[in-house]
Image: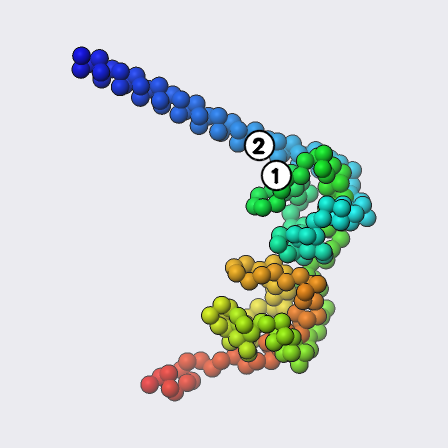
Amino acid sequence: MIDQKRSGVLIARVISRFFLLMAIGVVILGQTSVSAQNQKAAAKAGAAAPGNSDNGKMVFTSQNCGSCHGADAQGGVGPLIGPPPGTMAQFVVSVRQPTGQMPAYSDKQVSDQEIADLYAYLKTMGSPAQAAVTLTGNAAHGKQIFTSYGCYQCHGYVGQGGAAGVRIAPPPISLKAVMAYIRQPTGQMPPYTSKVVSDQDVADIYAYLQSIPAPPPVKDIPLLNQ
């Protein structure tokens, strides 16, 4: 009797493991199928005719891309996409099978050619970091807008840092790097598009922060050496 019970338990375990392996196999096959579909979609769109940037601008407007990515595609609720950070194939996958909160767009909603046109339009946009190369900042104006834009609320009145933001005066990085970070920041800082803070404003704020002297080393402060 005991042997029969043990045999029954062993058989049940074998059956359960069999079905578990079958389930894992189905999941793996499903993931492989999705990956293959993504690759096919990218290859299909990549083979489309060269994009038309003028039509791409209309697609950007008609699909209301600006509501998430900003009117100038410099970021908003969604990330910066102008210019696109990846290849055409990667762009197709991000439209057809996006991650995060962005909805997927089928070829019934946006054709492969329209994606190519949209990509061509976004490629015509200059990177905010490129604009920083030719700008000259006005420190006096930068001080005014540093306050009016509320930068001091996180970074302190003279960029010395605070509970919510790091020290930014004098800036430890280039204007080009600051420009790129403001448009597409990490952490808790919200993105600021060129519609909110212009490239010239960023250059002026940078000039103001550059005018602020660095704090003295700790060894040069007698009180802290006692």
Q: Can residue 133 be seen in this view?
A: no
Please give the name of the residue rendered at 76% of the width and 49% of the height, measured from the top-left corner.
61
* Numbered label attached to residue 97: 1
Whichever of callouts 2 and 1 sits on the residue coming sooner in the sequence is: 2
Please give the name of the residue rendered at 53% of the width and 32% of the height, measured from the top-left corner.
31
Please give the name of the residue rendered at 79% of the width and 47% of the height, measured from the top-left corner.
58
Using the rendered view, name the quadrant where residue 104 is placed. Answer: top right
User: 69 or 32, which is in the foreground?
Assistant: 69
Reading the image, the residue beneath label 2 is: 34
Tell whether 32 sits left or right of 91: left
Looking at the image, is 199 positioned above or below residue 90?
Answer: below
Q: Does the residue at mark 2 contact the one at mark 1 (Cβ under 8 Å)?
A: yes
Picture coordinates of residue 96, whole percent (x, y): 65, 38
Quadrant of the drawing holding the C terminus: bottom left
Using the rendered view, name the quadrant where residue 182 is placed. Answer: bottom right
Quadrant of the drawing holding the N terminus: top left
Query: Regarding mark 2 in the picture, which secondary structure is present there?
Result: helix
Looking at the image, is 195 positioned above or below residue 61?
Answer: below
Please give the name of the residue rendered at 72% of the width and 41% of the height, measured from the top-left corner.
115
**Total count of labels:** 2
Tell whether 165 sits left or right of 82: left
